[in-house]
Image (tube, rainbow, N blue to C red):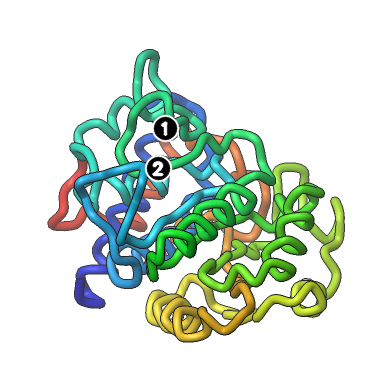
Amino acid sequence: MTLQELQTQVQQTRRDILRMVHAVNSGHPGGSLGCAEFFAALYGKVMTYSKDFSMDGKGEDLFFLSNGHISPVFYSTLARSGFFPVSELATFRKLDSRLQGHPTTHEGLPGIRIASGSLGQGLSVALGAAQAKKLNNDDKLVYTLHGDGELQEGQVWEAFMYAAGKKVDNVIATIDYNGRQIDGDTDVVMPLGDLKAKLEAFGWIVLEEENGNDLEKVIAVLEQAKTLTGNGKPVSILLHTEMGNGVDFMMGSHSWHGKAPNDEQLTSALEQNPETELTDY
């Protein structure tokens, strides 16, 4: 996809996110909006994958969403990338829908590889997949996404240690470093300190992008990360994003972590993100 096509995808994804959570008055718009550029870059430019979905994923790059509550951005991206009909986005969080609030594998939704309602588990699963690729002589990569608040889970740090200790160098773990979580700023709830230094001390290669909502920069850092794989160390990206990006009244606060906009707020948010040629579902 061209840069303009990716920019269009980002804008349409924002509309999808807002309309999905508004329709059922539930969901997590803040982190979803903040990661729209990351998902567009990953699925539209960086990863090699098949739309003919297989859980084996042989010969293709794999993605694992660890912070599953930002499912709206994931569902929109998968639908807009051709994994399932865009019209299905209208079933988000409804009874008998495959698009549950947190992704689940038993719903059989193409593109979903793990159930990620419980935080802290995505990297562990991804490392198993990455090691399986090595055993199968599969040279493709495994990508993950994590919330910064999620790093308060101990299992994440066990996985960080394991990845470096076992030289799992075909994994790229991106951390959505927006500085906010459900109860407030991460620096207040549980400070992460010098995260880059901590990960490097664990034996990881660490890249940092200060503007994780600049699409070109997101593409560049992901492409750079790819060049650093295969060198005996896992690779991490600290991607600084803005929660609620693209909607002025959602930015600058943690309050939209898990709250849906009302009718008036939805109208304002959609005016800031006009409909594209991709059209609404």
**Where in the figure is residue 121, as x and y percent of width and height?**
65, 44
Q: Quadrant of residue 3?
A: bottom left
Position of the C terminus, as image quadrant, is: top left
Check the image and name the residue furthest to the top: 95
Tell whether label 2 touches label 1 (CB within 8 Å): yes
Along the line of sight, the residue nearer the viewer: 137 or 66:
137
Along the line of sight, the residue nearer the viewer: 233 or 76:
233
Q: Which residue is mark 2?
A: 18
Q: What amino acid type should be assigned to the residue bearing mark 1?
A: His
Residue drawn where x is 76% and y is 48% of the image: 155
Residue drawn where x is 19% and y is 57% of the image: 276
Q: Quadrant of residue 203?
A: bottom right
Position of the N terminus, as image quadrant, is: bottom left
Q: What amino acid type should be assigned to the residue bearing mark 2?
A: Leu
**Viewer can see residue 58:** yes
User: Label 2's element?
Assistant: helix
**Viewer can see residue 245:** no
**Where in the figure is residue 243, as x and y percent of width and height?**
58, 57
Measured along the vertical axis of the image, is residue 251 above or below residue 89?
Answer: below
**Where in the figure is residue 96, as x and y percent of width and height?**
36, 14
Q: Which residue is mark 1?
A: 22
Q: Pointer 1: residues within 10 angstroms few (<14), some, or many (20+)? A: some
